[in-house]
Amino acid sequence: MTTIRQATMADYPAIYQLVETAFKTARVSDGTEQDFVENLRKSDNYLPELELVAEVEGVLVGHVMLTKQVIHTASGQRAALLLAPLCVAFDYRNQGIGGQLMTAVFERAVALSHDAVFLVGDPNYYKQYGFRHASELGITNDSEIPDEFILGMELVPDALKEVTGSLKID
């Protein structure tokens, strides 16, 4: 039985280890995801209510966090979210835990009036959950990351219908 809950400060060391280990076998990784998590927590973009963990029998086996992200438009900045990172321990993959984490964190995000999310990740994995290339949503990539890995999704139908702009993911 998998339990999904909000991460606590007491979880941070285990999350660091989980993220570091999980991304060693990820298709899209630069090896610094665990440090990225810590840096996001220290930033003004951190939303503690949108950092969740998955536990199986008291052991952390999954993690997801959403932080503030902006879309730069002709009329200014438009709020969105960044999913970074999502991970599941190797021995627990292909059991739906990543999907459960995303479902739970997206439900919380919508309840907090967020309507769109972007990420850097494997299109083959994330497309099954409704993610599309950011360009298909009218959003261009201003990052050094290849376009094929910049994905987005509307959490609320048509949330980005009238939005054009660019995204810079550091």
Image (tube, helix red, strand yellow):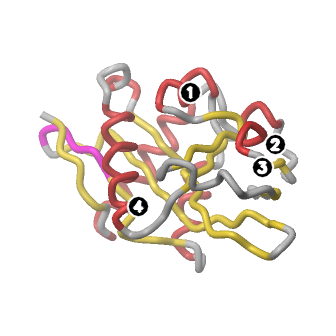
* Comparing labels 4 and 2, the label whose residue is closer to the camera: 4
Q: Which residues are magenta?
A: 53-57
Q: CA distance from mark 4 to mark 2?
A: 25 Å
Residue under pointer 2: 145
Q: Position of residue 27 (x, y in %)?
A: 63, 25
The residue drawn where x is 27% and y is 45% is: 54
Label 2 neighbour load within 10 Å: few <14, some 14-19, many 20+: few
* Mark 3 vs mark 1, CA separation in Å: 17 Å
Pointer 3 residue: 139
Instruction: Give left or right: position of 93 versus 2.
Output: right
- In the depicted view, which residue is nearer to us: 110 or 15? 110
Residue corresponding to mark 1: 127
Name the quadrant containing residue 101: top left
Which is closer to the viewer, label 3 or label 2?
3
Please indicate whether residue 79 sits to the left or right of residue 94 in the image: right
Whole-percent x and y of residue 23? 55, 35
Q: Check disc 3 and give the amino acid type.
A: Ile
- Magenta-colored stretch includes residue 55: yes
Q: CA distance from mark 1 to mark 2?
A: 18 Å
Q: Is residue 30 left or right of residue 7?
A: right
Q: Of discs 3 and 1, which sits in the foreground?
A: 3
Q: Outermost residue toward the bottom?
A: 44
Label 4: which residue? Answer: 109
| Residue at image coords 41%, 61% | 109
Element marked by disc 4:
helix
- Decide which of tag 3 and tag 2 comes sooner along the chain: 3
Q: Earlier in the sequence, mark 3 or mark 1?
A: 1
